[in-house]
Image (tube, helix red, strand yellow):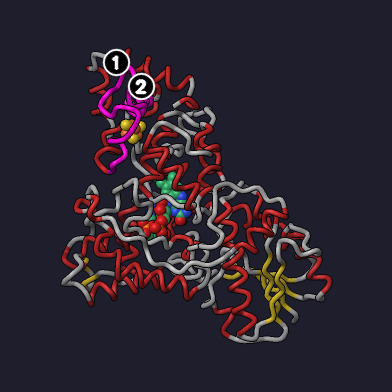
Amino acid sequence: AKTLRLILGDQLNSRHSWFEKKDDDIFYLMMEMRQETDYVKHHIQKVVAFFLAMRTFSEELLDKGHQVIYYRLDDKHNEQNLQKNLQKIIKEKKIEKFEYQLPDEHRLDKQLKEICDGISIDSEAFDSEHFLTERIFLKEFFKGKKSYLMESFYREMRKKYDILMDGKEPLTGKWNYDHANRNKLKSTDILEPQLLKSRDVSDIVAMIKKSGVETIGSIDEENFIWPYSRRESLALVDYFCKHLLANFGKYQDAMHTDDPFLFHSRLSFSMNSKMIAPLEVVEKVEKYWYEYQDEIDIAQVEGFIRQIIGWREYMRGIYWAKMPDFANLNFFGNRRKLPEFFWTGDTKMNCLKHAIGQSLEQAYAHHIQRLMVTGNFAMLAGIKPDEVDAWYLGIYIDAIEWVEITNTRGMSQFADGGIVGTKPYASSSNYIDKMSNYCGTCHYSKSKKTGDKACPFNSLYWHFYHRNEDKLAKNPRIGMVYRTLAKMKDKEAILDQAEKYLKNLDAL
Ligand code: FAD
Ligand code: SF4
C-alpha cells in the first residue's frame, strides 16, 4: 500500500529500522513549519540548527534512494500546519496508510492522535528507537513508590545495559563518584578556543528573517558551530573523549567568565534531535576510557554516563508519567513576571549577566548556570513557572519540552513540590562564589546581606524560605534552614532588603 511516513524535526535517526529497505511505495515526509517555529519564541540558532539538520537528513535519505517530500518554510504550498499539510499530501499522492514515530512532546502526541482519528486511511505509530526505555518504563518501575529516586533508576540502567559493570556489581564496587566532582576552576585550566568546524548558514537565516519568524538571541552566520549531521555529531563525541573527558566530572559544576563551554560535551542537540543515540555515546565513551584508564580516572567517566543514562532518561520517564498535569504545577503559587534582563543580559548581577549573555550569544549555558544562576534566581524571586518555562524552552539549542520542562519546572523551580528533587535548589551567593569567578568583579558585594550593594541572592534566599515556610518547614532536609532563620538577629532587615529588591527586579 502507498504509505506516507512522517519524520519530525527531532527524529533524525538514520539508523531507524524504517530505513533498512528501499521501497517505491513509501514516501518520507519532512516539513519546516510555522507551527513549530512559533509555539514559543526560539533562539535563532535553534531554528537554524533544526532546519539545517533536517535538510541534511533529507538529502542523505535521497542519496540512499528513498523518496522524500520536503517542505521548506517558504515553499508556496506549505500550509505551515501539520494537519493541513498531511491532509493535502495524503489526498494528492493517493496515500493509503499513514505512519509516524511516537513523538516526544505531549503537544505533538495529542495532535497526531487527533489527526489519525480524523483521516479515513489506516495509521500506525512506531517507536523512535532512540531511548533506553519505553515511555512508560519509569512509571512502572516506581509503581507503588512515593518518590521517584533518580539513583535507583540509574543503577537499573547500568545493570540493564551492562555499563561500567563487573558482572552484577558496579566496576570498582562504587556506583557514584559525585563527591569527587565539585571543583572550582583555575584560570590555567581554561581550554584554548575549541577547534570545531563551522559553517556558513546565512541562506537559512535570511529565509527565517524573510518569513517573519520572531526569534531571540544572536548568531554568527558565517561560523555556525552546532553539529548538523550524524557525522558531525560523531566527530563531537570523539572530540569530547580526546579533549574534555579527562576533566569532565572534576569541573562539571564550575563556571567561568571567559569560557562558556568548559569541559561540557555540547552533545545535547545531537542527541535530542536523535542524530546520535544515548547508548552509542555512552558506549563510545566507556570504550575510550577502557583504553586510556591510566590517564583518565573513573569519576570523570561515571559522572558523564550518569548524566545521559541517568538524568536524561529519567527526565523523559518523569515527563510521560506526569504530563499533561506537570505543565500546570506551581507549588509555591509564584506570580511574578520574568525581569526584562532575561532577554537582554543587561543586569548588574555579574553571574546573571554572564549566564544570560552567553545564552543569548551561544544558545547554550551549562547545567549549573541553568540551575544555580538563572533557575535559582527565578525561584528565589518568585517568578511564575510558565514564564520561566517559556524562557528555557526558547533560548537553548537543546530545548525540547520533555527535557526542558522536567528540568525547569521540576528540578530548578521545585514547582512540582518534589517529584524530581527532594528539596529546592536554592542558594545564596556562597555557592555561586564557590564555583565561579563571577563575584570578584560584580557590582554587588557577595558578603553583604543588607545595605548598599548587598548581593540580591543573599536576602532573596532568606525571603524565599520565610515566605514559603508553610510549604517547606516539614521537609526533613530543610529543617536546619528554619532553625537558622529563627535565630537570626538581623532577620527583619534582611527581609526588608529582599522586599526592596522584589519591588523592582528590573533595576537589579
Ligand atoms: P554535558 O554537561 O556534556 O552532559 C552530557 C549530556 O548529559 C547532555 O548532553 C545531556 O543530554 C545529558 N544531561 C545532563 N544533565 C541533564 C539533565 N539534568 N537532564 C537531562 N539530560 C541531562 N537539557 C536538554 O537537553 N534540554 C533542555 O531543554 C534542558 N533544559 C534545562 C533547564 C534547566 C533549568 C536545567 C537546570 C537543565 C536543563 N537541561 C536541559 C539539562 C542540562 O543542563 C543540559 O542537558 C546540558 O547543559 C547540555 O549541555 P551539554 O550537552 O554540554 O551537557
Ligand atoms: Fe551574583 Fe551576587 Fe556574586 Fe554578584 S555577588 S556575581 S549577584 S552571586
Residue 469: horizontal and vertical position, in percent?
Answer: 36, 23
Q: Is residue 369 above or below residue 35?
A: above
The mark found on residue 357 in the picture is none
Residue type, label 1: Lys
What residue lies at 72% left-to-right and 55% top-to-bottom? Answer: 210
Q: Is residue 387 above or below residue 255?
A: above
Residue 174: horizontal and vertical position, in percent?
Answer: 19, 61
Q: Is residue 157 above or below residue 496?
A: below
Residue 425: horizontal and vertical position, in percent?
Answer: 35, 38
Say whether marks 2 and 1 touch (CB < 8 Å).
yes
For ligand 2, give the image quadrant: top left
Quarter where residue 73 is shown: bottom right
| Quadrant (top left/top right/bottom left/bottom right) for the C terminus | top left
Q: Which residue matches tag 2?
A: 466
What residue lies at 23% left-to-right and 13% top-to-bottom? Answer: 489
Q: Is residue 427 visible?
A: no
Question: Camera-side residue: 448 or 387?
Answer: 448
Q: Is residue 441 a member of the stretch shown in magenta?
A: yes
* For residue 51, side relative to residue 454 (left or right): right
Question: Camera-side residue: 242 or 195?
Answer: 195
The mark found on residue 491 in the picture is 1
Q: Secondary structure at mark 1?
A: helix
Residue type, label 2: His
**Residue range highlighted in magenta:** 436-465
